[in-house]
Image (cartoon, coloured by chain):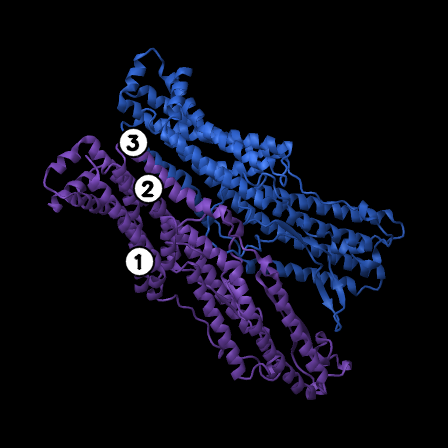
Amino acid sequence: MLKTLIRRELLDNLMTFRFAAAVFITLLLVVANTIVLLKDYEQRLTAYNTAVQESHEELRAEKTYSGYSGTLVVHRPPNPLSIFNLGLDKQVGNKIEVYHAFVPTIWDAEKHGADNPFLNLFTSIDIVLVFQGVLSLLALIFAYDALAGERERGTLRLVLTHPIQRGYILFAKYISAMLCLLVPLLISLLLSIILLTTSTTVALNTDDFLRIGGIVLTSLLYVSLFYLIGLCISALTRRTSTALMLCMFVWGVLVLVYPNLILTAVDIVPQPETQISVYHQIKQMWEKLDREKKQFIRNDAVLGPPSRGGEDMDAGFGLEGVEYTFWQGEDKPSILLYFHQTGLYAGKIKAESEPQVPHVQDYYGFYNRETINTVQRTWLVRKPALEAIYIQPANLGRMLLRFSPGGLYDAATEAWAGTGLEGTQDFFSTVQRYRRAVVDYFYDQKIFESRQWFAADKGTADWDTLPQFSFQRSDTGINAKRALPDMLLLLTMNVILFTVIMLIFIKSEV
Amino acid sequence: MWHITKREIYDNLNSLRFALTTVLLLALMVTNAVKHLREHPKRVQRYQDAVTESLNHLTDRADDSLYTLAQYGPGNFYKKPSLLHFCANGGESVLPDVVEVDKPPVFMTDAEGNRLLEGIWSLSYPDANLNNKDVGPNVSQVDWAFIIGYILSLIALWFTFDAFSGEREQGTLRLMLANSIPRHTVLIGKFLGALLSISIPFALAVLVNLLLISTASTVHLTTEAWGRLGIIFSLALLYTSLFVALGLLVSARVQQSAVSLMILLLTWVTLVVFMPSTLASIASSFSPATSFDEFWKQRNPIQENLWDKYKEGRSSKSVDRRLRAKSEFYTENAEREERWQEEQLKYRTSQVHRARAITSISPATLLQHLMARFAGTGFERHLQFVENTQRYARQLREFVADTDRADPESLHILGVREGMSKKPISPEAVPRFEDTLNLNRDFNTAAMELLLLTLFVLVLLSGAYLAFVRVEV
């Protein structure tokens, strides 16, 4: 019986103009956008590869270890799944310095020079966005006359004269419509995956296919939710034209109006001014370090006397052979970043300064150790403050968006693709671990207090034994774990709506 | 004809869609007004603080000496926030709101850190809004451009999808045509009826919005702003009539109103939502920008050239020659720096212009551009601001040169302390920077886009006419 019903509904849906239109429009939009997005991804990947190469060479050109500031740069590779959901992949900076004087965060990252920031004026697009707009619309178009139409034509009465449970009718309608909606979804996805695999630059592995599977599953839940919304409206209204009009209104509100309206109404703009006291606190810690540094130099028997320029760091302790001294630092109150470092570069230290060298080495050992301790202390206050400024409003915004199915869908697919905030943060926690590894390596090899820290005459810095940076996207299990809550919410909404429709339909008179 | 129009309006006024439209538009417009009232004073305050600080820099430097002014230049320039920010924000959060005055570069220091060779100021254009470190979700703000571009166009389709197909289904179309009314009159009547019935809730929402904004003490709308608002309102009507015409065209051709609505919706999604972003992506992928490192590679040889030239002059015996070599080195370096920055900006601008030209196929993008232009926000406004600063920079340099020329005791070697006038200058005499907006100019440049939009409307309207005249009832 159920089979007959499903067959009838399927034939009803498949032979319609709307099915043809649905397949056509989804294919057109998805394929066109895949081509464009693929090209964009390839460009970003090339930019990334060039940048990695350039940084690699730049670091090798440094002769002293202290020269690694500003040249030990790691780059964030573009995520191939950003084609499906762009998320923050393009927005967040993709190059970041690794340096012992600050803990790298997502806000400290900068962009490669290659892209034109003005092009951000144009809205960006991804495949999930196409689905979000088009598939939801199509689901409603399939649903609006499912019950109201049959009621109008009188066929509903006819069907109900047979001894069939009403739930079966509903179920048959749901299954067949979902099958029809699956066709454009799967065909277009298949085509875009074929396009991706033919490209030589995109290397998708098994994990990626699992993630894409997750995205498909989420899309299915999303489409089904919209179909049920349409069905609900169709069950409630008497006439198809009213149902259609209401469906359209609901679509406009859920997809278009609500996300923009709620985030305009609720202020989620980061307010760095609220945490300015933390910035001052951090600055004070650095000033304390400055005082300790001066104290250390003053107490040193050799470096101490002002005649040797010990007080004034820029003078390079009066070492003969110093080529230049440098001052390295950042002062950005809006991201609570403050640090400064001083150093010197000596190509060849002359013999008369030789007795002084161990003292300078001692000094740098002390200075670098204390710098790292200071950074540790500042990080303890900087981290929560940054979270209060940037993460909390961002999460509030995302939470508010979850009240619309589109927001849930976006969040879940972002989690699958790994382009969401958490996925992007993964990269930066890897960078933080890498910084720790570099610092540990410097400690182990006693590089901080070595001669190669500032002088290039007796052996230069050996960059090949430095720990290598490598970043692996989180494994599929973690993606799934992050996507699961949102998918469950979608599922629950589906179940609730289906039950509601069932109740309405069973009670309603024909 | 008026009968038909009136009938249409009465018909619409009683419908469910009219009520829903009114509620929706009112909610959007009120949110927009509240948001503007909350944020605009802050924006203005920030701008004023920044301008005061930058003016202080200027007067301090002028107070010090002509040389200091010539070397350090004015303070940073800030973009004046538009009064009509609520109409179209034009992507202001992406655009930088400042043109910076670079500190003089230090070419050489001695062991004590004293500056031996220090250049003069130059303009530099920051890439983007550097403070924008937001990691929040990416949504468009509810401004008028959004309300008109997305919501109003959708509403226009909502009001017209069953204009003919609905009447055909009910059989009233045949009845109407049985009277001796020419078909084009029916069409125009329907068109006006739909346009007017959409304008009523829209005008109401706009009125509430403007009432909220203009009565607040924190925001003061000038006469010019009201004029611009008038233009924006008529723009909105033009844009709406485009979609009304589209709705009538499809409705006249299609037998069932459900099919008509489906076609219209899919067209709308493609035209308004996807076309702008897809076309922009295509346009921007055509022309990859030169990378920062490449720019450096082009630039460094020039720098070395300049340096060699300076070294030649430095070894000269005459003091005058030596000073002149220094001055030349400074000014040429600053000029090159500026030219380099300008070229980069120009390159990027042309890229954006190309992308904008391509996206103009979509009427939604046309509207966004026009709205931003008349609201005094967005990319064109940014370029105008940059031009203003460039003009001012020239003016200031001329002022410095003229003041120096007026002093007979000076050696007239600009950029070097020993070679410049030592007479004190009054800070009042120094020209001030003022960021202005020119409406005439906007009008001229917008003419093309306006024409295109009108053309769209005319084409669709005549299409609807042809479709309706030939259709069998």
Question: Which residue type carries mark 3?
Answer: Ser
Q: Chain of mark 2?
A: A
Q: Which residue is mark 3?
A: A241
Give the number of the disc on residue B105: none
User: Circle 2: is it few (<14), some (14-19), or many (20+) Cα within 10 Å?
Assistant: many
Q: Residue furthest front?
A: A507
Callout 1: SS: helix
User: On what subunit does the disc labeled 3 rest?
Assistant: A
Question: Chain A in the picture: what colour?
Answer: purple
| Displayed quadrant of residue B111 | bottom right
> Which element carries disc 2, helix, strand or loop?
helix
Question: Which residue is more in the foreground, B16 or B339?
Answer: B16
| Residue B267, image quadrant | top left
N-terminal of the pair, mark 3 or mark 1, is 1
B210, above or below B280, in the image: above
The N terminus of chain A - image quarter:
top left
Residue A137 is marked as 2
Name the amino acid, label 2.
Leu
Q: Which residue is pictured at 13% across the width and 46% down the height?
A: A2
* Left or right of A40 in this view: A54: right
The answer to whether B41 is drawn above or below residue A472 in the figure is above
- Per the image, the residue denoted by label 1 is A214
Viewer-proximal residue, B143 or A452? Answer: B143
Q: Earlier in the sequence, mark 1 or mark 2?
A: 2
Q: How many marks?
A: 3
Cα–Cα span, label 2 and label 3: 16 Å
